[in-house]
């Protein structure tokens, strides 16, 4: 048999029929649906007289449009209320499992999938959200889909897809103290650009990946789409198998034993050939922070804002000038020390328990600068409860952070929660696009550690200087 990559192995196991031209009809193992899509897409199926083909393989949760205000009501907020009501009605009628507000399983869809054991190695997973690539951290083949594709999956449990090429990103060396998976993937995006992965499925491999814990791997895969790739995967290992043990929807007993036998074979063959290979030395990475309006516009915390005139490409130079104007930054100025107004710790990138533990370690015994609004938004109800059982919420509250309810919140400002125009935030999210956190908001992407450092300093700061 021809040597296969991890991606090829999982993809080929799910092909129902090859349609020609590199297009395959795939079986979908898991379909995650959030509040922006559930009601409208299920309404359309009802209008067309189509039932949900496999409600047992579809899982829903409100996250994008619900308020995260402390003590929120089950009615959500005015904008998201209708979406939430429709979601409840339609999922109940279709027999789809809904993890509603206050339920142990509610949260950001890309956080609850892994923590519930719904995300498993070797599954094909889709969701109407581009950061579905997150689930590849467990060895799943996962990608975001459009609204019409959401309806197609609901009606057929299949999907037509163009087969991408294979890319491997080899990550060698060791991350330094105070440097995290978020810094590693931002460094890679800055080095190779946001178009590097276009048309590829990316496998992250190498000693630096093996050394990461499971939740850090999820962060790494989360930003695959910012590298230009719909799919990011990491071969599962004992860390993943131990992580999944005992999860509510994970296999147990004899089924688990059989699953482990299959999961251990999910790796690229040594002789497998990739269409493109990239290399990163993790030892070169320091804390990263974006300066512009694209994730590739990123520098080390000790760097200076780039000078557009140094860029030979005319289009890139124009983009740099526009980004600097929007961000209100001057070329040549150190990024460290730039005053900020907001800090946001949350999103499907960095709202897991491990992220909150790192942030709390730095926040303990310190205070948020008086002029800074700082929020911590746990990624799920389970994360919130566990964090509170460990007293992390008290650490944040004592430091001057707001401790909020689970949801997407300030990541995309789809629920009424926005950064005011012209104000500057350090955010643990994955995108710093124009208006992403609100019209006119200025976003700097960074790790949770860097976010705490900024909150305390009142300006972009190096978290390594805060070590207890």
Image: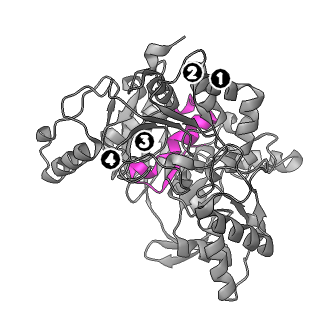
Mark nearest the camera among 4 and 2 is 2
Q: Is residue 119 magenta?
A: no
> Residue 284: horizontal and vertical position, in percent?
36, 24
Contact flag, marks 2 and 1 (Cβ < 8 Å):
yes
* Alpha-carbon span between mark 4 and mark 3: 24 Å
- For disc 2, the marked residue is 363
Q: Is residue 223 magenta?
A: yes
Choose the circle earlier in sequence order: 2 or 1. Answer: 2
Choose the circle earlier in sequence order: 4 or 2. Answer: 4
**Front-most of 83 and 223?**
83
At horizontal 61% and vertical 75% (from top left) the residue drawn is: 40
Mark 3 closeness class: few <14, some 14–19, many ≥20 residues within 10 Å: some
Secondary structure beneath disc 3? strand
**Front-most of 119 and 268?**
119
* Alpha-carbon span between mark 2 and mark 1: 7 Å
Q: Quadrant of the C terminus?
A: top right
- For disc 4, the marked residue is 293
* Alpha-carbon span between mark 3 and mark 1: 37 Å
Mark nearest the camera among 3 and 2 is 2
Q: Is residue 6 above or below residue 164?
A: above
> Which stretch appears magenta?
209-235
Q: Which mark is residue 395?
A: 1
Contact flag, marks 4 and 3 (Cβ < 8 Å):
no
Choose the circle earlier in sequence order: 3 or 2. Answer: 3
Mark 1 closeness class: few <14, some 14–19, many ≥20 residues within 10 Å: many
């Amino acid at each position: 048999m021809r040597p296969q990559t991890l991606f090829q192995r999982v993809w080929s196991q799910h092909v129902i029929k090859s349609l020609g031209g590199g297009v395959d009809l795939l079986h979908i193992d898991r379909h995650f649906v959030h509040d922006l899509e559930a009601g409208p897409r299920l309404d359309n199926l009802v209008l067309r007289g189509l039932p949900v083909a496999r409600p047992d393989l579809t899982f829903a949760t409100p996250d994008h449009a619900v308020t995260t205000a402390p003590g929120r009501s089950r009615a959500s907020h005015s904008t998201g209320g209708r979406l939430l009501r429709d979601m409840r009605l339609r999922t109940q009628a279709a027999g789809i499992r809904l993890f509603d507000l206050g339920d142990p399983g509610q949260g950001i869809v890309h956080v609850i999938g892994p923590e519930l054991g719904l995300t498993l190695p070797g599954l094909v997973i889709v969701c109407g959200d581009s950061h579905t690539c997150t689930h590849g951290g467990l060895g799943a083949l996962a990608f975001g889909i459009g609204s019409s594709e959401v309806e197609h999956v609901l009606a057929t449990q299949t999907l037509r897809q163009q087969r991408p090429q294979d890319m491997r990103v080899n990550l060698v060396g060791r991350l330094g103290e105070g440097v995290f998976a978020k810094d590693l993937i931002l460094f890679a995006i800055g080095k190779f650009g946001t178009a590097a992965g276009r048309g590829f499925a990316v496998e992250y491999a190498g000693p630096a990946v093996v050394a990461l814990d499971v939740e850090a791997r999820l962060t790494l895969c989360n930003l695959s789409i910012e590298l230009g790739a719909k799919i990011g995967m990491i071969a599962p290992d004992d860390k993943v198998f131990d992580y999944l043990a005992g999860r509510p929807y994970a296999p147990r007993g004899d089924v688990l034993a059989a699953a482990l036998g299959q999961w251990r074979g999910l790796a690229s063959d040594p002789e497998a050939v990739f269409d493109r290979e990239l290399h990163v030395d993790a030892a070169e990475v320091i804390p990263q922070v974006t300066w512009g309006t694209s994730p590739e516009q990123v520098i080390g915390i000790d760097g200076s804002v780039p000078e557009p005139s140094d860029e030979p490409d005319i289009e890139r130079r124009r983009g740099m000038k526009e980004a600097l104007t929007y961000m209100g930054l001057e070329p040549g100025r150190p990024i460290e020390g730039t005053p900020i107004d907001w800090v946001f710790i949350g999103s499907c990138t960095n709202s897991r328990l491990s992220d909150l533990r790192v942030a709390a370690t730095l926040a303990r015994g310190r205070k948020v600068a008086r002029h800074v609004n700082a929020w911590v938004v746990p990624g799920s109800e389970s994360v919130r409860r566990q964090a509170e059982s460990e007293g992390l919420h008290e650490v944040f509250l004592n430091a001057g952070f707001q401790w909020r309810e689970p949801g997407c919140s300030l990541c995309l400002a789809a629920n009424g929660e926005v950064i005011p125009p012209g104000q500057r935030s350090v955010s643990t999210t994955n995108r710093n696009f124009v208006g992403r956190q609100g019209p006119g908001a200025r976003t700097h992407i960074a790790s949770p550690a860097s976010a705490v450092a900024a909150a305390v300093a009142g300006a972009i700061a190096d978290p390594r200087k805060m070590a207890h």
